[in-house]
Structure formats: C-alpha cells, structure tokens
Image (cartoon, helix red, strand yellow):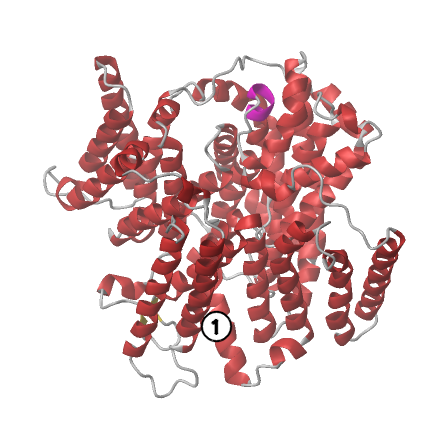
Amino acid sequence: MILEHIIAAVEAVADPYTLVLMAVGVAAGLLAGAIPGFTITMAVILTLPFTFGMDAVRGLAVMIGVFVGGLSGGLMAGILTGIPGTPSSVATTFDGFPMARGGRPGLALGIGVWSSFFGGMISACFLMALAPSLARIGLEFGPWDYFSLVVFALTITSSLAGKNMLKGVIAGVAGLLIAAIGEDETSGVARFTFEFDDLRQGFDFLPVLVGLFAFSQLLTDLRDTAKAQRPMVIGQAKHIHIEHKAAVKAIVARWTTLLRSSLIGVFVGILPGAGGTIANILAYDQAKKASKHPEQFGSGLPEGIIAPESSNNAVEGGALITMMALGIPGDVVTAVMLGALLIHNIAPSPTFISTEPVLAYSIMVSFVFGLCIMLALQALCLRVFVQVTRIPLYRLGTVILIYCAIGVFALNNIVFDLWTLFWFGLLGYAMRRFEFPLAPMILGVVLGDNAEINLIRALASDSDLTLFVTRPWSLFFLTVAIFSIAFPWYQHARGVKRWAVFYLPAVPLALSLPLFMMGGTVRPLIAAGLIAFAGWLLWRRYRSGWALPPKQGESTMEIRES
Amino acid sequence: MRRINADVVIALLLMVICAVFFVETFAYQKVHLAIIGSKLWPRVVVVAMFLLASAYLVQSLRLPSKRAQQPWSLTQWLRDNRNVIGSFAFYGLFLLTLPYLGMLLGGTLFVFGALTFLGRRTWLNHAIHIAIAVVSVGFMWWVFTHALGVVLPEGEILPR
C-alpha cells in the first residue's frame, strides 16, 4: 500500500515540467541561501506567489526545492568568505572557512555539499518511516489535546527566544490576536474590525508573513547606507573545483559524526519552532565534545563541516514530520508550506497522510529529488553566486521589495493585501528593532484558528476544564509547555540556584505520568524508562554533591540571537 | 525616579491596545444559536495579552534596558533610520498612487525612486537605476500578467 503511494508520488513529481521548475527552485534557493542577509525563509515566502497557479504537488515540490537549495546554499558563502549565508550555516564557517583559507576550498565545499545531501537523505528516511506512525498517534488526539499541542508549540517557540522569552510569548499571543481579526468562521460575527469593512475578511496569511519577515528583513539590511551600497560579499571567491571524491571519502570515514548530527537535526526539526539555526550549533558542539581532539576544532577539521551541514539539512525532514502528521509547523518554512496547502484547500491533520496519500508522499519524494538536484546544481550555482554577490545590496533589496508587492497582490487581487504588507512590514521592523522574535508571531497567526476551533469544540462537548489535565496527551503537552517556559530560567539558574539541580531530572519524571495514564504496554514501559533515567540523573547529582556547574562558553541561544 | 525606557512605553502601549480590543468585544453581534459565543476566544487572547504586557511592564521597570542609558535624540534617530523611513515613504507613495499609475508605471517609479534615494547620486548610477527599474518591473509584470494570468492594477494613465 505504502509502496503504491510512493510510486504514485514519484510519478507525480517526476513530471519533466515539475522537475524543471524544481531545478529553478533549487538554483534560486542555493543563491538566496548563499547571499548573506537573504534568509531561506524569505526565499520560500517569495516563491509562494509563483505556485498559486500550480497544482498542490507541483507547488509544494518547487517550494521544497527552494528550501533544500537554501539550506545548502548557506555553506557557499560561509566556506568561501567566512560570512554565513544563512543563520543555519553559522557553525559551518568555524571549520569550513579555515579549511578554505588553508588551500582546500574545493574539499571544504565538497564536504559541505555531500554532508548536506547525506543529512537530508537520512532525515528523508525518518520522514517516510515516522510521519505515518506519528499521524496514527495523532488520531488519538481530541480537541483538548490539540489545543494543548498548540499551546506547547507556541511556548516552545517563545522559549527559544532565550533571554527575550517574555517578548516571545507576547509575540505568540499577538499572532493569535491577529488571527482572530475578521469574521468568525463558525458564526460569521465580525470581530475586531472597528467598523472597517476591509477587515471583515481578516488578514491573509501571505501578506502578513511577507510583511513580518521579508519586508522587515530587507529594510533592516538597508538601514546602514554604507553597507547597503557595498557589494554583498567582498571576498576572493573564484572559480573553484569541488572535490567530490575526496569529500565523500572524508565523510564515510566519519560516518558516526554524520549519523549523530543528522539525528540531532531530525530531533530539532520535530520540535515546533526550532530549526537549522539551533541544529547546526548543537551538532557542532556535540561533534566537538565527542572528538578525541576537540582543541583542533576551528582549524579546518572535516568533522566541523560535516556536523553542522548534515544537521541543518536533516532539520527539514523532522519539521515536515510534525507538519504532515499533526498539522503543526516545525519551523517558519513549514508554516509557509502549511499556508500553501491551505491555499489549495488542504488542511494537514493526522488524517492528511491517509486522505491525501499521493500529495503527502509527494512532499517526501520532492525532498529526496530536491537533494539530488541540489547536488547536481551546486557547482553551477557557485559560479553564479560569485557574480550575484558583486551586486550592491540596495539594488537587489529594492527589486525584491517590489516583487513582494506584486507577489502579494497576486494572491487575492486586492489592494488591501498591499496595505497589509506595508503595515506588517512596519510592525516586523519595529519588532526586530525592539528584539521581539518574529517566529512565535508567525506560529500564532498560523495556529490561531486551529487553537480557537479546538478550544470551542472542547468546551462545547464538555465544559469540564479539568479534562485539559486529566487527558493524557493534553497533560503531556502542557507538561512540556511548562518545562519549556521554565527553560530560560533554568539556564540562568544553572550553577547558581539550588533548584536548577532538579530541573532536568524533573522533566522525565513529570512526563512519565501522562505516559502511564495512556495505558497499553509500550507507553508505560517508556514511562518506566523515563523514571529510571530521572533516577540516574539524580544519582549523578548526588555523587557530585548536588552541584551543577554553570554552562560554559557561548550557549546555543546566545549564538542564535547573534 | 527611573527613566522611562522604550520597553516601558511598549508595555503601556500593549496594555492600551488590549483595553481597546477588550472593549470592542462588547460590540459583537449576538448569535443566539451558538453554544459558545464568538467573544470567548478573543477575550481569552486579549486577557492573556494584557497579563503578559503587565508582566513585561513590571520587568521593564525592574530591569531598565540599555537603551535607557543613552540620551535619545530625534535628529540622530532620523539619521539612523533615514533609509528605512525613506523606503517606507516610497512604498506608501506607491500604494497611494497605485489606482492612478497602475502596477507597471507605479512599480517602475517606485524602484527608480528608491534606488536613487538609497544609492549614490551619479549619472552612471541614475542610468543603471533606470535600467534596473524598467527591466525588473517590466519582466515581473510580464511574468505575472502573461505567464501566470494575474491581472495587475492597470491605473488610469497608461492606455489599456
């Protein structure tokens, strides 16, 4: 059955026209990812208007192509110039740039490209294996559980804002508020319209997204006149021959680093709100800790390129798992894809894979195809990258600004959307200036309707509020949400306050309760394992005299913010 | 007395917005058949937002931000944000004139205006900016109008 769906999906994606469009998308993604200042998210958002006229399979295939290309494109700038093209390739520069400066730019690029490919492939395997199983679990969810899942998604995204967690939560709730503007879907009552007729239809997702992310990012980049007038990358990037054979050999010899980093990427991708930015630093950090020569990291070690590049590509497989199985976007890019599906009147939910199997498997197949196309196009794009980065930023930025306007207009053919873009561009710029994270707001806008519908369904079927804590899955998500809110405090308190010693053991201990409540055989066994793990953590703390050293060096969150 | 910093102002602004939005929920039309009214969710969100804004206010008062230590000057702020204000102004102007100029003409003028404002003012640059504006907007207009079948605003100046 699954094989039939996969074959049907391959047939749908392998259409020559789709493949050509995907290749264009991958090339565009590679370039967008390579240009510092232009994010992958922006590239995927800007692709969306082009996909309106396409069917869902083709449209999503193109967007996935852009995304796969973008993830891999970041490494070109990082390795050749030392400036990461995207935040998800920050750690790649740590060893990639020294290796390139040391006379092996072709090998550094080769390791980066092939690590991206292998990391992506490993996560694609996880995507195909895990998404249907997770979707089956999702079928157990009632409206209480779904509401708690949305709460969890918003809190974990906000907690990833590090020291700005409160601002992150405010941004998330503001997103919910924005989603509530317009006519109520069930009763048709106009809400928060302040008697403006245009507001009755609410804000469309795309203008809000483009305004908040792309528009504000461009204006932030253009703020500094001198920087805006300079070519985007000043470096000696020349025509370089990528050393494919040597790169594959180097990666195969370090397969444990590849596997570990890819697993980190998949796990981070599954968490709502977390993305390649966190995964690449985390994987680099773990590779360094696992190495016999950690002191050599930063001098051009292959492991230092394999770890970040495989993990940031593996993230997307993980993010797609949550989106396809539960309808919860794992990151902003999957939130855009969710928006694209909604434009085609398809709403991902636990039944998505069973009701739309060809489309669901097409997403997975497109991911694999995108990786292969990326591999083929990398060398070509490297040459174009050298030319594109000679253009001053203000010229490219201004052209993209007008493109944003045309693309947004194309969605509904109404000028109101252009004004939405303008106001949300202003809001996004102000939020960036005052250090409010944008990702929670995007998630709030995307999940607002979902949260409301499930809350109303839950209360309409039973007014008993205790069901939110007595239903196992709901309790599970709320427990994780509480711990994710407390996480930034834990980071500050670590090594300073006594309670921080008990934070980590408390997590598995608390999570074991809902797992026990779920019944069956496997889940209580997992719960017992979690209790044992908590006991082991406590024992270790007891052995060290109930002390926990403060976190050393730069934390993941701090790097992410910078 | 502590100096009022930007965070305090934002927190107060958020609280005012919440109050305005909360009052607005009383103006909702009543739907008698609904089991749960349309007001519930907006009120839940607004109240949550108000509580968070209050916590933000308290936090901002307790931990004065770095910005508070630097004297704020309007001239400096305008100078720092010149490009952003200019770009927004050009974009706003583009939107206001869109019904008259249309996407093709308005877009070209916007790109040329913004490029000239942001770039160095030399004759060569002006020529490059005109070329970029005409080619980029013309190309995108052609792609959306002819390839994707999107009817872009035509305006009143250019003949149909």
Q: Position of residue B61 (x, y in %)?
A: 45, 56
Mark 1: few/some/many CA within 10 Å (<14, 14-19, 20+): some
Q: Quadrant of the N terminus of chain B?
A: bottom left
Q: Is residue A345 visible?
A: no
- The residue positioned 64% from the left and 29% from the top of the image is A92
Q: Which segment is the magenta one?
A: A76-81
In this picture, residue B69 sits left or right of residue B155:
right
- Does residue A219 sit above or below A502 in this rendering? above
- Does residue A161 sit above or below B29 in this rendering? above
Observer-nearest of A470 and A391: A470
- Does residue B78 sit above or below A467 in this rendering? above
Secondary structure of the residue carrying tag 1 is helix
In this picture, residue A391 sits left or right of residue A142:
left
Q: Residue furthest front?
A: B1
Q: Is residue A143 visible?
A: yes
According to the picture, the residue beneath numbered tag 1 turns out to be A453
The three-letter code of the residue at mark 1 reads Ile
Q: Position of residue A44 (x, y in %)?
A: 47, 42
Q: Position of residue A104 (x, y in %)?
A: 68, 14
Say whether residue B26 is magenta. no
Q: How many marks?
A: 1
Q: Quadrant of the C terminus of chain B?
A: top left
Hey, which quadrant is residue B44 in on the image?
Answer: bottom left
In this picture, residue B37 sits left or right of residue A409:
right
Observer-nearest of A102 and A544: A544
Chain holding disc 1: A
